[in-house]
Amino acid sequence: MRFRVVIVSEGYAAAPSGRHPGVLVLLAPSEGKTAPPAGSAPVDLERLAFPQLAPQRAQLIAKLTRVANGNPKRALAALGLSAGQAAEIERDRDLLGAPAAPAAEVYSGVLYQHLDLASLTAPQRRRASERMLVASALWGVVGLDDRIPAYRLGIGASLPRTKGLAAWWKPALTKALPADALVLDLRSQAYASAWRPPRGEVVEVRAFVDAGGKRTPVSHMAKAIRGEVARMVARAAKAPESPEQAAALVEAAGERVELTPPAKPGAAWRLDVLRATAV
């Protein structure tokens, strides 16, 4: 392998490679969402991935619906919206009756534009559905094929009697999701705090412009690169089974990468994608 591995903590033995059957790719949600066609069937909570999360999903939907149908100023404040975004509240007023569509069609932000599922082959789309979940402040996690309505709820929102959505979700996600997973983490830090596998390995994907030895993180580019990395995983006939294999997969696609092992037990690996420009 040609990618650079940076040892940042001598004496720490990372978990052995190859123990995982494959990778779980966790995607960030997007604020941008495409409303499903009118007349489409609504969400069925029992048919979403990890149906054991249905009680938590129902509780949040009830809270969010009450907020959206209450005082408009309070709703804006609770959801962290500006006055110019007041129309977004409309989406949350009847979530159980609103039209639903596959999550891959509802989320429409930069990451999903670069994942570009529609241009993949049928086997590749099937692999994406098998390997990927979308982190969500409302649903906990959803599969790409799960049918959901367009909604507005970020992980930083403040709902009644809910101290913080990441902390609120953590116990339920810890019970539902695999404890020893190899996770390729394409979420933001806010969403990542809701769940990490207690006995698994996490590989955080970051993006930098590396010009003349000076590295600058670029958030918009990071979303694009994370979408491209997810696409690489979908196109791969065999999923990576270790952080090193994940780095090799990205490098084989033509990227310059740097893989850094965890600095301490329980910390994440870092997979940095380095580009000369932000374009």
Image: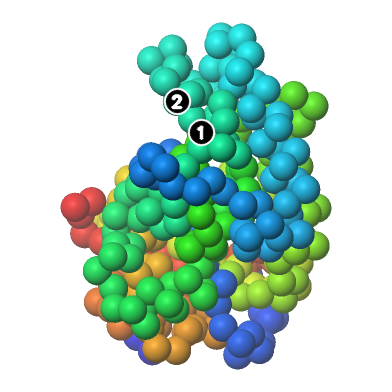
Residue 167 drawn at (x, y percent): 75, 43
Identify the secondary structure beneath mark 1.
loop
> Which amino acid, by three-letter code, is at mark 1?
Arg
Q: Residue at x 56, y 9 (%)?
A: 73
How far apart marks 1 and 2 lie (CA) works out to: 6 Å
Position of 232 compared to 265: left or right?
Answer: left
Residue type of the residue flagged with mark 2: Glu
Dot 2 alpha-carbon crowd within 10 angstroms: few under 14, some 14 to 19, many 20 or more: some
74 w.r.t. 238: above or below: above
Residue shown at the point (71%, 29%) measured from the top left = 63
* Residue 7 seen in the current view: no
196 and 231: which one is in front? 231
Q: Mark 1 — residue? A: 152
- Image height check: is 191 above or below 19? above
**88 left or right of 95?**
left
Image position, residue 196 (x, y; %): 68, 61
Tag count = 2
Residue 126 sits above or below residue 79 on the image: below
Q: Earlier in the sequence, mark 1 or mark 2?
A: 2
Task: State the image coordinates of residue 56 (x, y, percent, origin top left).
Answer: 75, 46
**Residue visible at 44% across and 72% down in the picture:** 128
- In the rendered image, residue 189, in percent from the top left (x then y), is placed at 56, 48
Kindly identify the residue that appears in the image at 57 percent across and 53 percent down: 135
Q: Give the labeled residue for mark 2.
A: 88
Task: Determine whether, in the image, residue 239 is placed left or right of residue 93.
Answer: left
Question: Contact, CB < 8 Å: mark 1 with mark 2?
Answer: yes
Up the image or down, 116 lies above or below 5; here it is above
User: Which secondary structure lies at badge 2?
Assistant: helix
